[in-house]
Structure formats: C-alpha cells, structure tokens
Amino acid sequence: MKELSLEQMENIEGGLKISSLVGIFCGATLVLAASVVLAPIAGATGVGCAVGLYAESYWEKQGLTVD
C-alpha cells in the first residue's frame, strides 16, 4: 500500500466548492422570491444562503480557507 506524506494529505481537492453551493442557494432564493407562485418556498433556500454566508465569514475570521 502506498503511504502518503503529510503534504500530500493536506492538498485533497475535488467536489463542489462551498462558495458555488452558497451562490446556488442565494440565486435560487432571488429567483423564487421574484416569482409570485413560488415565493413562499424562497424561505427554505434563503436559510441555506444565510447559513452559508455566515459560515464562510466565520471560517475566514478563523483563518481557514475553504476554497
């Protein structure tokens, strides 16, 4: 079995970026809020948008990079 060094384990990349996911939630909130029929659903995606924005700012204050 191949053993990885510490540097190799720290640089794992892949998947959907956090900022992209937050952008999707915020965009969906705006689109749903602008529509008359689906406006009540905008609250659900709005929570995801707000939590994502708060999490990104908290991680940035802690010195963590997520992207």
Image: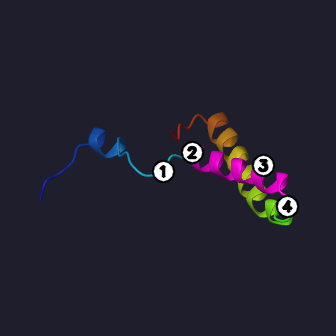
* Residue contact at pointers 1 and 2, CB within 8 angstroms: yes
As helix, strand or loop, the secondary structure at mark 3 comes to: helix
Label pair 2/4, CB-CB below 8 angstroms? no
The disc label shown at residue 30, or none: 3
Which residue ends up furthest to the left in the rendered image? 1
Identity of the residue drawn at 85% across and 61% down: 39
- Mark 4 is surrounded, within 10 Å at the Cα level, by few (under 14), some (14 to 19) or many (20 or more) other residues, namely some
Residue lying at 84% horizontally and 51% vertically, measured from the top left: 34
Instruction: Please name which of the two marks, 2 or 3, marks the residue nearer to the observer.
Output: 3
Which element type, helix, strand or loop, lies under badge 1? loop
Disc 1/disc 2 C-alpha distance (Å): 7 Å
Q: Are the residues tagged 2 and 3 within 8 Å (C-beta)?
A: no
Q: Which residues are magenta?
A: 18-35
Q: Quadrant of residue 61?
A: top right
The numbered disc on residue 39 is 4
Instruction: Looking at the image, tell me whether mark 4 or mark 3 is earlier in sequence order.
Output: 3
Of tags 2 and 4, which is closer to the observer? Answer: 4
Total labels: the figure holds 4
Q: Is residue 46 magenta?
A: no
> What residue is shown with label 2?
20
Residue 13 in percent (x, y) is at 37, 45
Q: Residue at x 68, y 49 (%)?
A: 52
- Give the residue number, with chain letter if any, for mark 1: 16
Amino acid under disc 3: Leu
